[in-house]
Amino acid sequence: MILGAGRAVSMTDEEFRLIRDLICDFCGIYFEDSLKFLVERRLQPRLPVFGFVSFRDYYRLIKYGRECEREFDEIVERVTTNETYFFREAYQLRAFTDEILPMVVAQRSEGRIRVWSAGCSTGEEPYSIAMLLDKCPIVAGRPVDVFGNDISRKVLRTARAGMYTQASFRSTDNAYIKEYFHRDGRTYQLDERIRNRVTFGHLNLMDENALALIGKVDVILCRNVIIYFNHASRARLLATFYRKLRPGGFLLLGHSESLVNETKDFELAPLTNDMVYRKPGEGSLL
Ligand SMILES: C[S@@+](CC[C@H](N)C(=O)[O-])C[C@H]1O[C@@H](n2cnc3c(N)ncnc32)[C@H](O)[C@@H]1O
């Protein structure tokens, strides 16, 4: 039971399951039964906006209403977890520069190299990649496209602005802050040179039509995203990643995510700095 606009509104178990399943169909994010309180709490403020007195009415709105698309934008801002920071999982980024990139460069002697940060949140992940590329002699003179996508419009605004606070630097060497950021009081503006290396776009990873616009890529970072998905959504997304990767291309997941029990399409590539996944093909083990 929670309070909103002066009255108590609770979500029944049935309403929870209906709304939970719609959210999952839309964006892949799945709430276990034990998280009903969270969905109730986060969506409750939406009821008075429409003058609704029950979550059943809200369910009807997002299932059948003309405004359902706009309302899902609202829901996304309330149910996504956007936690991120620069140089997260540094050992994996070391594997990216020291081992993965040299293999990609050797594999593809010409053309643009493409790196996709899928679920990039406020941009720290693709910008970390861009800073590393800036220092990476192996790609000197070689065009590398880095692009980041997210379903949340709010995080993308921050990403595009490239403006951060101390919380984003918990894993960043001071040398990088000095070299690539301009401090103004409590905020740190990322240098334009690095900002210009990354392109951001709004994209729902569950939206097949939108995904069709993304061409083949060499490396996908999808870290700390599928941990919030259910098995069916993960399977859909992994099949997409498989199609988007070039043969021998790499898939980097978060440290608590794995493809065990998900798919056998990818091979495990044991690198010195990390274990990552790879689409079988050119240069791979299979
Ligand atoms: C926890 S953050 C991870 C950010 C970054 N990859 C990292 O590891 O630091 C997860 C991000 O995935 C995004 N996300 C979740 N579901 C998505 C979907 N269906 N399509 C696109 N982005 C999604 C969320 O909005 C959120 O910003």
Image: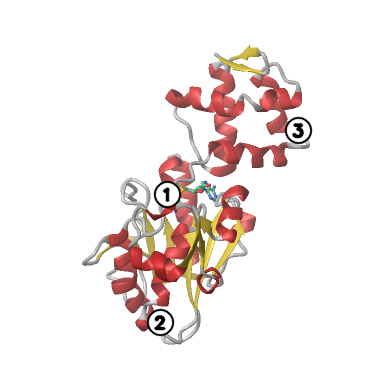
- Occupied quadrant, residue 21: top right
Tag 2, which secondary structure?
helix
Q: Is 268 in front, or is 99? A: 99
Left or right side of 81 for 72: right
Q: Amino acid at mark 3?
A: Gly
- Residue receiving disc 3: 65
Mark 2 vs mark 3: in front: 2
Frontmost of labels 2 and 1 is 1
Quarter assignment of residue 279: bottom left
Q: Earlier in the sequence, mark 2 or mark 1?
A: 2
- Residue that badge 2 annotates: 139
Question: Where is residue 23 drawn, in percent x and y?
Answer: 58, 36
Q: Residue furthest front?
A: 185
- The residue that label 1 is drawn on is 167
Count residues near mark 1 (Cα–Cα under 10 Å), then give few for <14, some for 14-19, many for 20+: few
Earlier in the chain: of badge 1 and badge 3, it is 3
Which of the two discs, 2 and 3, labels the residue nearer the N terminus? 3
- Please tell me whether mark 1 sits on a helix, a strand or a loop: helix
Q: Position of residue 114 (x, y in %)?
A: 49, 72
Q: Name the residue type under label 1.
A: Ala
Residue 246 in sight: no
Q: Mark 2 is on which residue type?
A: Val
Task: Characterize the local packing of mark 3: few (<14), some (14-19) or many (20 or more) Cα atoms within 10 angstroms.
Answer: few
The total number of labels drawn is 3
Query: Residue at (36%, 55%) from the top-left corner?
Result: 88
Number of other residues with Cα within 10 Å of mark 2, as a class: few under 14, some 14 to 19, many 20 or more: some
Residue pictured at 67% horizontal, 14% vertical: 6
Q: Residue furthest right?
A: 66
Check if mark 1's residue and mark 3's residue have beta carbons within 8 Å: no
Q: Quadrant of the N terminus?
A: top right
Q: Is residue 39 left or right of residue 105?
A: right
